[in-house]
Image: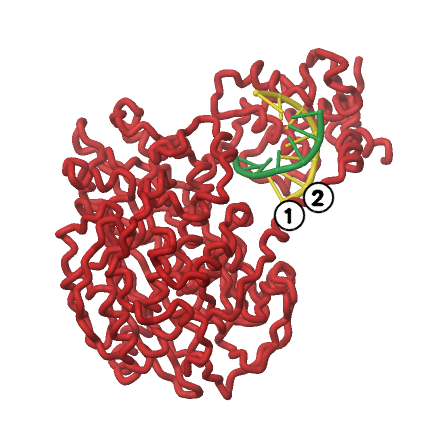
Chain colours: A red, B yellow, C green
Amino acid sequence: MVFKKRLDYGFDAFSVSNVPRAPRSIRRRDRTKRTVDDNQICAFELLASLAGKLLEEKSESYAASNVSEGHGHVSIGKDVVKHEIEYDDKPLKTECVEHLSCKESIVASDWTTGNSDNLKKFKHSENNAILECALTKMQSSYSEQTKGDLKFAICKDNVAYGSFPDDLEGCSPNFRELCDGICDNGVKREREAKGLESGPFTFANNCPLKDPLHLSMSFLAPINTDRDVKLPSRNDSVPNASFSRHRNNIKIGSRDDDDEKFSRFNKLSNRFKASRPPTRIEDQRIRKFLTSKYWKEAPKLRDFENFRADGEIKSLHRKRKTYYNYDKCQYDTLHKRRKLFDHSSIVTSDGGIGSGSVSNSPEKVKNENKNSSVAMSHGACEISSLTGQLASDKSSDSHVKLNIKSFRIPELYIEVSKSATVGSLKMTVMEAVTALLGGRIHVGVLFHGKKLRDDSRTLSQSGISSEDNLDALGFTLEPNPGIAPPPLCSEDHPLLLPCGAAPPNLTSTRTTPAMDIKIPNATADPPLLTNSEKAMDSNYKHTSSQTDILTDQKLSESRALVLVPGMNVEALSVVPANHKIRKSELAQRRTRRPFSVSEVEALVQAVEELGTGRWRDVKLQAFENADHRTYVDLKDKWKTLVHTAKISPQQRRGEPVPQELLDRVMTAHAYWSQHQAKQLGKHHTGTLKITDSQAGKNGVAVVI
DNA sequence: GTTAGGG
DNA sequence: CCCTAAC
């Protein structure tokens, strides 16, 4: 059998042994090991605590409704995308922990392209989007179970251009108001903030509070416009190389051209980084982080440093300004956790796993996820998800009707400790999603797995005209790849400084009463893993419940989109509904296209003749016309075929490959493993014969 | 741009 | 399929 093994693995084994490579995982890990200053407390915390007090009294009334889950929906109407998110509170033992549950639904109606004004706005940003986010934050006092509801309404618009849509009605009070209210210990003030033209954030006025107890804030999230490009992460860290890599590609700079990779590349990283406040929540146990790939691009702490160094917003970059302002307002609910997202912040949690220290502090509360954090596999935590399925309804020949059930958004990686509450998890997810949606997104259209970048093409031209084709259509909501960052505004934006009185370092204050509250009854978590990854592995079985939770959440979130009949088809492309595909993958990965038996046969045929190691030739010979099959794909397929041939039929998945082909695979593999394909040149199929006894077993091939 | 491998 | 390293 040694011999056999040699035949089967000889080549590979040899290569492997001789080519030591540092596991990528290690590299990634290293990248993620950054810590953030723990001294910063998120301003939001303060806000939360205050709000919690205010709301405490009313917790009762909301209990019923909130207990279950919040409901939010995003509606996309003309020119406006409205995103309403409600977070439900749950009693928390720890004040730092926030529980939120949210559901998002998106209703898209007539995405109008006709409005020139709006179009303009849309152009580089997702569109005018109004994001209303109601956050309920619970703050609990020590042992007492209380519920506080803090609701935020976040209105988002395409601020970049400085215009605030008139249709933002019903928006909650402006941001400043909220901040003020907070500052005043719950006293609500109403002020009007007006959107800044150049500023990333704009506040909506005239937004009535739904409930006195709810603090509503509306603000405009930074939008990806050309101007936004300046986000630190982008400027500093994004390697151009990544962009250049795309095959199909893209012009960097132009959002329409963004490639899948490009978008993926940018995804959240920019958004989160930029938006995330430098501050850090002390008790926060939840870590969010982007995929390792994002890390490298992270701006690091530079921003943070700048921020601290200069209290003045002015000194900051415009974009940063916005964020900072946010901080000042202590408002940044969304960002609060997000900051952890930052590369630099990843490690952050206090004592958290991320920092590599085993946290076992007494103060830890059970609800708070502290110690062992369970890293959710991306699958589990992907917030995103929105896989969409379009139902096509062909009522008229000239129109394509799409029923978009959901959008998929870029993949998010979230890591929370296993002791984290469901509520905190939800919140975490919510924040990530909100940040994503709130920031800058645009709709991507996929057709047969390819992005349709040419907006000028008609559906018919794109082949999206028949019902049959609709199955291959999909669309995604993705971060705007950002083009050029908006020029920095030299003027300060008054609006941005609602809480200007509060020094930036306010966030660093740890003395906030609420924050410091310790819960007597809190159950100290047992010391756990020092390493999050280990934690994840070792606790794998424990994650099941969380997984379920996530699943549920996904389900709820997936309810999301409803297309209005009249919507402009141009704007929405049908996305191939592939629920199996991870939502996160939809946005970025090519759609999976399993090899058909005939393709496998062609591949086998080619490899038999050309051997392994000549994938380009294989491609040209057998798949020249299959644009979606790259030589790398063929190579990978061969790899999997070899593997498939080695495993028992029971272990095989997918469309069964005829054993005959697998036998040929093994034969060819064995043969070429012994012969350097490059040296031997062509071998015709006829030259390879497999003895019956050997076939499919040891893979020994005999050349006759 | 290809190839080989790990993920 | 993706991503990288190494050519």
Which quarter of the rendered picture does the C terminus of chain A lie within? top right
| Residue A457 picture quarter | top left
> What residue appears at the point 59 percent right and 66 percent down from the top-left corner?
A353
Residue A471 in view of the camera? no
Secondary structure at badge 2 equals loop
What is the spatial separation of the Cα atoms under label 2 and label 1, in whole angstroms?
8 Å
Q: What residue type is labelled 2?
A: Ala
> What residue appears at the point 27 percent right and 85 percent down from the top-left corner?
A57
Along the horizontal axis of the image, is A453 left or right of A354? left
Q: Which amino acid does label 1 sit on?
A: Arg
**In the foreground, A195 or A285:** A195
Along the horizontal axis of the image, is A608 left or right of A214? right
Residue under disc 2 on the same chain as residue under disc 1: yes
> What residue appears at the point 24 percent right and 57 percent down from the top-left corner?
A155
Q: How crowded is mark 1: few (under 14 residues within 10 Å), some or many (20 or more)?
A: few
Picture coordinates of residue A468, whole percent (x, y): 32, 29
Q: Which of marks 2 and 1 is nearer the N terminus?
A: 2
Compared to residue C4, the image places residue A419 above or below, namely below
Picture coordinates of residue A482, whole percent (x, y): 37, 41
Along the horizontal axis of the image, is A675 left or right of A237? right
Pointer 2 chain: A
Pointer 1 chain: A
**Mark 2 and mark 1 residues within 8 Å of each other at the beta carbon:** yes
Picture coordinates of residue A698, whole percent (x, y): 78, 31
Compared to residue A628, the image places residue A260 above or below, namely below
Picture coordinates of residue A479, whole percent (x, y): 37, 45
Compared to residue A295, the image places residue A422 above or below, namely below
Secondary structure at badge 1 equals helix
Which label number is shown at residue A22?
2
In the picture of the structure, the residue carrying the numbered disc 1 is A27
